[in-house]
Image (spheres, grey):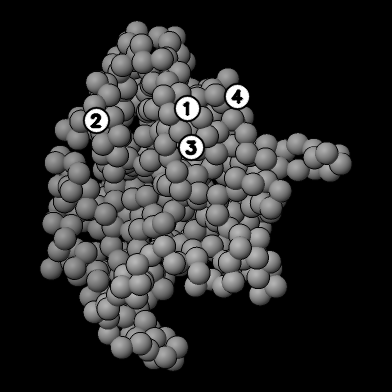
Amino acid sequence: MTYIPHSPKERDAMLNTIGLKNLDEMFDAVPAKYRFPQLDLPPALTEMEAASLLGELAGSNETARDLVSFLGAGMYNHYIPSVVDHVIRRGEFYTAYTPYQPEISQGTLQGIFEYQSLMTALTGMELSNASHYDGATAAAEAVNMAYANFRGKRRKVVISPTVHPQYRETIRTYTQGMELTLAGDDANADLQAGPEALVSLVDQDTALMIVQYPDFFGRVFDYTKVIEEAHAKGAMVCVVVNPVALAMFKTPGDMGADIVVGEGQPLGIPMWFGGPSLGFFTTRKKFVHKMAGRLVGETADSRGEKAYVLTLTAREQHIKREKATSNICSNQGLLALASAVYLSVVGKTGLRQVADLCYQKAHYAASELSKIPGVGLCFSQPFFHEFALCLGAPVAEINAHLLEHGILGGYDLGTDYPSMKDHMLIAVTEMNSKEEIDLLVEVIQEAVHA
């Protein structure tokens, strides 16, 4: 609920305008017997009692503050400067709703504008929107945009099997009933094959090809040639990215990507047991009229002062339903603001330092874990801060043993890829110390050879 800070005098003036004496008269149309129904609720608590109860409930959960975490697979344990929380908890932002009225929403609109500017710089693209729910829905909206761009005449989407399994599942959900062909989305595919294998699936009916960078297994590929070949067949290309990796590696914009999407959670947003988070979506100027979400532009008001407004918003709430690219709705502006504050605070150099720490620590962990007899890396390609580890033992058993030592283990890849049974995806961030990595190695060695 939005907080409305009207004074009693202002309230009385409004009531007087509509000819009412008090607020109760506003509900005269509701039959009296329905105004205050008896609800089966427990007795009310004092603030002190409620705080104690909520603390007790929260205490039953274990978080990355209580455990050493090596779990990633889309959500990552990064350090968040305290100023991020301080800014987004300000009432002006915390209770702000969708900025339909620019004259009273300049702060919210500017926050989104700054976020858009930062995301285009990070991804190497020309435009960014706001208001996608998470990385998975942003990827699905890329399909919608490509479909709209070709006016439904191209009905095939090629998806790499190394795109996050939950992203692929969300795309399948979104495209139900659209009569699209999804190619490449096969958990039984040859995972050792490089992205070049996808090009053979692209044809004259392909609207979009989707790849991930780094991919779900943490591997880093240069997609420049693949994108060129897809473009030669007239298809668009969407790259799903880890935003922190872009501080270290070549941007998808430099590779020629048409759309860059991803999960904004690594940029100043807590893991929060899986959400809420932020889906970022950047693209080229020529596709702006088909881009879903919200786009904030900078202009000048009647007095010549700088002002911000919503513009080119291709959703059904703003334009005719049949012309809308999407009905993406909730305003993720608060989390976009969090990411904008984070990026502004750490800056270009700081984000590069975060990426470098993640990279160096992950490679140290991979090196030490590979020394355990019977344990090794699954892939030989370069990786960022995640890597797939072959354990030769059930991942669930290894993780149970790790948990006994206060360690949250990696993701069980066999859950989504049948060929990767007994394989674990391990994530290392700047939050993991050398001592914690050494403990991980020690406990996994103990578990594997128990």
For the point 35% across and 25% down, the residue is: 195
| Foreground: disc 3 or disc 4 | 3
| Foreground: disc 4 or disc 2 | 2
| Foreground: disc 1 or disc 4 | 1
Query: Mark 4 vs mark 2: which is more N-terminal?
Result: 2
Residue 184 left/right relative to 351: left
For the point 22% across and 53% down, the residue is: 412
> How far apart are the two marked residues, 3 and 2, measured between alpha carbons?
22 Å
Residue 224 left/right relative to 427: right
> How far apart are the two marked residues, 4 and 2, measured between alpha carbons?
29 Å
Residue situated in front as seen by the camera: 128 or 256: 128
On the image, numbered disc 4 is attached to which residue?
285
- Residue type at numbered disc 3: Gln
> How far apart are the two marked residues, 2 and 1, measured between alpha carbons?
22 Å
In percent of width and height, residue 393 lies at 13, 56
Q: Residues within 10 Å of mark 4 (few under 14, many from 20)?
A: few
- Residue type at numbered disc 2: Gln
On the image, numbered disc 2 is attached to which residue?
176
In the figure, 199 relative to 326: above or below? above
Q: Which mark is residue 317?
A: 3
The answer, for residue 367, to whether it is visible in the render is no
Query: Mark 1 vs mark 4: which is more N-terminal?
Result: 4
The answer, for residue 105, to whether it is visible in the render is yes
On the image, numbered disc 1 is attached to which residue?
320
Residues marked 2 and 1 touching at CB (< 8 Å) = no
